[in-house]
Image: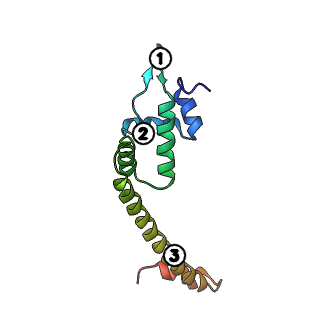
């Protein structure tokens, strides 16, 4: 595959991204506007592929669009300290850890509710009772 003349479909397939998502990332400023062919089709280059791969990996790790935008901005400043990148990553990790803690608590509560099930009728259902207002 020629990485200097990719169609939007080629770019999408190469990064396992939907075409609509590629367009969205362009509009959101995460991908630079590609040049256009004589037929007015988008013509992506290797830089677009690398940048979209970066965005996809960051999104897969749960970084927000704003965080990805900032990480991209910082990644373009090769001679700068990476301290700000570290701050963003550590902040995101703290949020992930908070969500894990919340999910564990949620799982424990659901286990308790489900454990009260006596397999009777809906009128006697402890799960429905636990979900209903007092």
Q: Which residue is mark 3?
A: 104
Image height of 69 relative to 2, above or below: below
**At numbered mark 3, what does the secondary structure look like: helix, strand or loop?**
helix
Q: Which residue is mark 1?
A: 37
Q: CA distance from mark 1 to mark 2?
A: 20 Å
Position in image of residue 97 (x %, y %): 45, 69
- In this rendering, does residue 65 appear at all? yes
Image height of 25 relative to 61, above or below: above
* Outermost residue toward the top in this view: 38
Image height of 119 relative to 69, above or below: below
**At numbered mark 1, what does the secondary structure look like: helix, strand or loop?**
loop
- In this rendering, does residue 123 appear at all? no
- Mark closer to the chain start, 1 or 2: 2
Q: Which residue is mark 2?
A: 25
Report which quarter residue 123 is drawn in: bottom right
Residue at image position (39%, 32%) is: 32
* Coloring applied to the structure: rainbow
**10 Å crowding of disc 1: few (<14), some (14-19), many (20+):** few
**At numbered mark 2, what does the secondary structure look like: helix, strand or loop?**
helix
Residue at image position (37%, 57%) is: 88
Q: Are marks 3 and 1 in contact (CB under 8 Å)?
A: no
Q: Are marks 1 and 2 in contact (CB under 8 Å)?
A: no
Residue at image position (59%, 86%) is: 116
Image height of 25 relative to 125, above or below: above
**10 Å crowding of disc 3: few (<14), some (14-19), many (20+):** few
Q: Nearer the viewer, residue 69 or 118?
A: 69
Q: CA distance from mark 3 to mark 1?
A: 52 Å
Position in image of residue 23 (x %, y %): 44, 35
């Amino acid at each position: 595959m020629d990485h200097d003349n990719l169609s939007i479909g080629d770019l999408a397939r190469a990064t396992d991204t939907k075409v609509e998502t590629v367009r969205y990332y362009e509009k959101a400023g995460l991908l630079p506007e590609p040049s256009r062919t004589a037929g007015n089709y988008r013509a992506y280059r290797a830089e677009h592929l690398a940048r979209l791969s970066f965005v996809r990996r960051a999104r897969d790790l749960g970084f927000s669009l704003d965080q990805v935008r900032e990480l991209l901005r910082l990644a373009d400043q090769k001679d700068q300290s990476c301290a700000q990148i570290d701050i963003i990553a550590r902040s995101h990790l703290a949020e992930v850890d908070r969500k894990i803690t919340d999910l564990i608590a949620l799982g424990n509560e659901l286990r308790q509710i489900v454990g009260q099930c006596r397999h009777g009728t809906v009128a006697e259902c402890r799960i429905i009772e636990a979900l209903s207002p007092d």
